[in-house]
Image: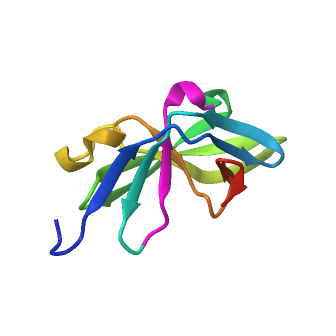
Amino acid sequence: MARGHRITITPSELPVEVAVGGQTLAKSDRPVLLEERGLLTRYYLPPDDVRTDLLRRTDRTTSCPFKGEASYWSVEVGGELYDDLVWSYQNPIPDARGITGLMCFYSERADVTVDGALL
């Protein structure tokens, strides 16, 4: 890892709900919080708590030196496509094992509510 840079992965019981276009995409009381210096806290959710029937896998991938390679999904709701709104690390690096296979939504592009408060 880069000097002084670190991520913190913490399992939680905070209720998290994600919606887009008026459609609930996920509800979970078992998120995993990922905190990374200089970035927003991200809420990674188990796929069982996500409406995966609304997701469409895309070809997009990104690489992060602190987490590994991410895969992306778009969301289709009400005939509208929200490109690359969801990502997951299927095989993260060892330091990020705590988010393996969990799904995360861009809180800047979806309505993410944590413990009753909209982010």
Q: Which residues are magenta?
A: 39-50
Horizontally, residue 96 falls left or right of residue 105, namely left
Vertical placement of residue 74 versus 106, above or below = above
Q: Position of residue 85 (x, y in %)?
A: 59, 52
Horizontally, residue 102 falls left or right of residue 57, namely left
- Image quadrant holding the C terminus, namely bottom right
Vertical placement of residue 101 versus 111, above or below = above
Q: Nearer the viewer, residue 32 or 75?
A: 32
Q: Position of residue 13 (x, y in %)?
A: 51, 37
Within the magenta stretch, is there residue 46? yes
Q: Nearer the viewer, residue 110 or 32?
A: 32
Vertical placement of residue 68 versus 91, above or below = below
Residue 61 visible somewhere in the drawing: no
Q: Nearer the viewer, residue 115 or 51?
A: 115
> Which residue is pictured at 31% across the width and 56% down the height?
8
> Which residue is pictured at 46% across the width and 41% down the height?
12
- Image quadrant holding the N terminus, namely bottom left
> Which residue is pictured at 79% across the width and 40% down the height?
23
Within the magenta stretch, is there residue 86? no
Instruction: Specify the color scheme.
Output: rainbow
When asked about the image quadrant of residue 4, the answer is bottom left
Q: Position of residue 19 (x, y in %)?
A: 73, 45
Residue 5 visible somewhere in the drawing: yes
When asked about the image quadrant of residue 109, the answer is bottom right
